[in-house]
Amino acid sequence: MPHLSYQTAGESHGPALLATVTGLPAGVRLDADFINLELSRRQGGYGRGGRQRIETDVVDFLTGVRRGKSIGSPLTMLIRNKDSRLDDLAKTPPVYRPRPGHADLAGSIKWLTTDCRETLERASARETAARVAAGAVARCLLRELGVEVFGFVRQIGPHATNAQITPQNWRDILKVRDASETYCPDPAATELQCAAIRQAKVDKDTVGGIVEAHAFGCPPGVGSSMDWRDKLDARIAYAVMGIQAFKAVEIGLGRDCAALPGSQVHDPIHFDRAQQGGPTLGFVRTSNNAGGTEGGMTNGQPVVVRGTMKPISTLLRGLPSIDLNTKEAQQSQYERSDVCAVSAASVVMENAVAFEIARAFCVKFGGDSMVEMGTNYDTFLRLARSLPLEPPEMTIA
Ligand code: EPS
């Protein structure tokens, strides 16, 4: 059986974007409204450019679905681009002055052309719409197993929130996030973030930030420590670093663990019989510095991921660059873009993280249908709750 996987296709100004999800069990209820809501959230956020006023991203299921449920075959989704003009030379002219920070220079050399457009059309963050669609499909599967993923903006420019997210409060925090123009669950921080974006626009500059995703409801033991390629934290890091403009990823305490002693980093283990029926199986922690993963596996605590997005590399005022044809010094070219896309990036990361968690669930509890997968999952939980399965071996002194 193939592993749950996805591929995207499409250029920013081509006719459409495509996402193909393979390895999805049959019988997953595909909530088109939810998928489209995630797509529209990705289009939003303070600081977005003119493109989002043109597009209304919605999925068309082309393959793999019958009567609203997956049927086990490759699932293809199409998102049409209204601003489709790739072959129109007047509307999509060549780009000869690469933008520092963008894929322009490296791509042009790689594909032996001086026209950066051939690279930038695919490198554009427009492609993330297809990734959100794939991640939202994965979340439809995860929901059937009681797993929810919540993403938000932690910081834009220097303005951060110190909101604490827990399994108990995240649904309330989600409402505060949804009321924020920057998707930050903190009205005071939102105001400062919007002001920073406004100032960047005046300065013809751009701003980056930090986004965070929390996954709730994962039991211990999803992922693996047997092979580095199957470590869940490694897979998540790979997926997050694959998002346009991301320069860092952290799990839990992340790089802050470097300065602290082990006694302040590692999360003490307790057993709470009252919580045995829940996804933690009763193995609770007084902190979650590990961000829900130990040894590449979930440990029953929320999976906590942070990603850092650099400021967008398309600046209205340009940056020192060259003309690739003449090699003469020139300011980099301006293409319509966003001043800040950190809010959109929070939606992209939460869905990209969800996909990796769903993938690991399919590896551990896999089956050809959701019924089979659900049964495997329940069996695992039952066995894990009845540990030890055999009386512990005693050593005789
Ligand atoms: C984007 C669409 C693009 C850009 C942006 C993201 O549309 P256009 O190029 O037509 O304005 O606004 O792309 C980038 C940030 C980039 O690096 O290329 C979208 O739909 O998210």
Image: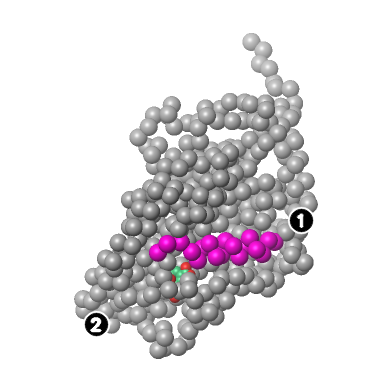
- Read off the residue under disc 1: 369
Q: Position of residue 350 (x, y in %)?
A: 53, 54
What type is the residue that disc 1 sits on? Ser
Q: Which residues are magenta?
A: 30-47
Residue at 70% x, 22% y: name it: 392
What type is the residue that disc 2 sits on? Thr
Contact check, label 2 and label 1, Cβ < 8 Å:
no
Looking at the image, which is closer to me, 66 or 342? 342
Q: Is residue 44 magenta?
A: yes
Q: Quadrant of the C terminus?
A: top right
* SS label for mark 2: loop
Disc 2 or disc 1, which is closer to the eye? 1
Q: Position of residue 279 (x, y in %)?
A: 66, 38
Image quarter of residue 309 = bottom left
Q: Quadrant of the N terminus?
A: bottom right
Q: Is mark 2 within 8 Å of ligand 1?
A: no
- Read off the residue under disc 2: 326
Q: Which mark is residue 266?
A: none
* Helix, strand or loop: magenta stretch: helix
The outermost residue toward the top is: 397
* SS label for mark 1: loop
Residue at 78% x, 51% y: name it: 372
Q: Is residue 137 magenta?
A: no
Residue 359 vs 123, above or below: the answer is above
